[in-house]
Image: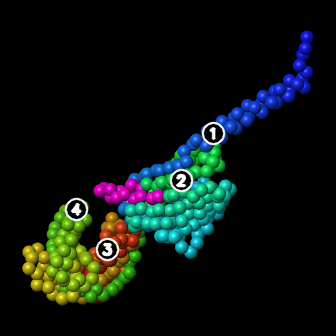
Amino acid sequence: MICNSPKKNKMKATKYIFFLLLIAVIGSSIYIAVQPNTFEVSRTRTINAPAAVIYDNVIDFKNWKDWSSWAEADKDMKITLPQLTSGVNGAYSWEDKDGIGTMKTLGTDTNTSIKQEMQFADYPSSDINWEFKSNNNGTTDVTWTISGKDLPFGFKAFSLFSGGMEKQIAPHYERSLEKLDSIVIADMKKYSVTVNGVTNHSGGYYLYNTASCKIDELANKISQMLPKVVKYAEENHITQAGKPFVNYIKWDVENNAAIFSSCIPTTERVITLEGGIITGELPRFKAIKTTLKGNHSNLNEAWETTKKYILKNGFEATENGPMIEAYITDKKNNPNPANWITEIYIAIKDTLK
């Protein structure tokens, strides 16, 4: 009877294990090699803000640290900002435990799209694309996409063993877009009310139309009436002498009623030919001026603050005197409500109580 020695059995077992490992390595290599040579990860979030406001945030890399989920997750990440961070050729870089990365903006279509390139460690560069699609209800669909092509074996191996690019990137994109959403909305809500004090309003000629409505319908009514005056001035080549304003003639809170004139200041008295558009003249008057920087939804607070200032400081509002709300900022060119400037003037008597 012939028995294999323990030494020979051990050698056979070692060879067998080595053979299995070799098969596993070869099999894994083949599996990795046949993986796609491209990848793409994309996420979309609808944000209740104008496309221009969101675009202005994303186009400047100085803002990225505030909403990047990678920066949120790694407090030790070192971010370096060059002199140029916004627009084409704007860039930034970062360093974390996994290596050094850079991001650069290659091209833009203002308020519509951004094309960027990302380079991380020794991996091949990736294409980054942003799209901003405006919706009829005032919201914006923000789509953030990363893609790569001609992927080398090492990159595909790393991606495979770490769960794939979708698993690695998608949660970060979702969290970052969520943070971007909250930051943009919070920024749009910022406002300030400043009572500037006593001033002399220069008065002057103006074109206007007059309407009455319920106080809670006022904003909508002004948005209908004021453009008519603006259009009349433009069509008749009438030179404007300042910013559009509203003069409140009656404000009856108890009966929820308001009478107002939508006005455009002019350099001279204009003889109007269209019914409903009239020429007026404001005399010079002393007033308490207040400046609101922010959304017009805060105008009621600005008016109340001005009235309290008048009472507290011993002034007396002129009976039937001008109560003006001047819109200094053109909303079409300044979509972020936080940047809107509105000036309030309440006429006061020349003498103190």
Q: Are marks 4 and 3 in contact (CB under 8 Å)?
A: no
- What secondary structure prevails in the magenta region? strand
Mark sitting earlier along the chain (3/1):
1
Q: CA distance from mark 4 to mark 2?
A: 53 Å
Q: Is residue 81 magenta?
A: no
Residue 160 figure quarter: top right
For the C terminus, the quadrant is: bottom left
Residues under labels 3 and 2: Cα distance?
Answer: 42 Å
- The residue at 58%/51% (across/down) is 151
Q: Nearer the viewer, mark 3 or mark 2?
A: 2
Residue corresponding to mark 2: 148
Q: Along the polypeptide, which appears first: circle 3 or circle 2?
A: 2
Tell me which segment is drawn in magenta.
129-142
Residue at 55% x, 48% y: name it: 37
Q: Are there few (<14), some (14-19), or many (20+) residues within 10 Å of tag 2?
A: some
Calculate the distance from the C-alpha at mark 4 to the C-alpha at mark 3. 22 Å
Residue 328 visible? The answer is yes
Image side of residue 32 versus residue 352, left or right: right
Report if the CB atoms under discs 3 and 2 are less than 8 Å apart.
no
Q: Earlier in the sequence, mark 1 or mark 4?
A: 1
Left or right, residue 166 beside residue 109: right
The residue nearer to you, when weighing 54 against 353, is 54
Residue 140: within the magenta? Answer: yes
Q: Give the number of the disc on residue 330.
A: 3
* SS assignment at label 2: strand
For disc 4, the marked residue is 217
Q: Residue 35 in the image: x percent, y percent?
A: 57, 42
- For image coordinates 56% across by 60% down, the residue present is 118
Of marks 4 and 2, the one in the foreground? 2
Q: Nearer the viewer, mark 4 or mark 3?
A: 3
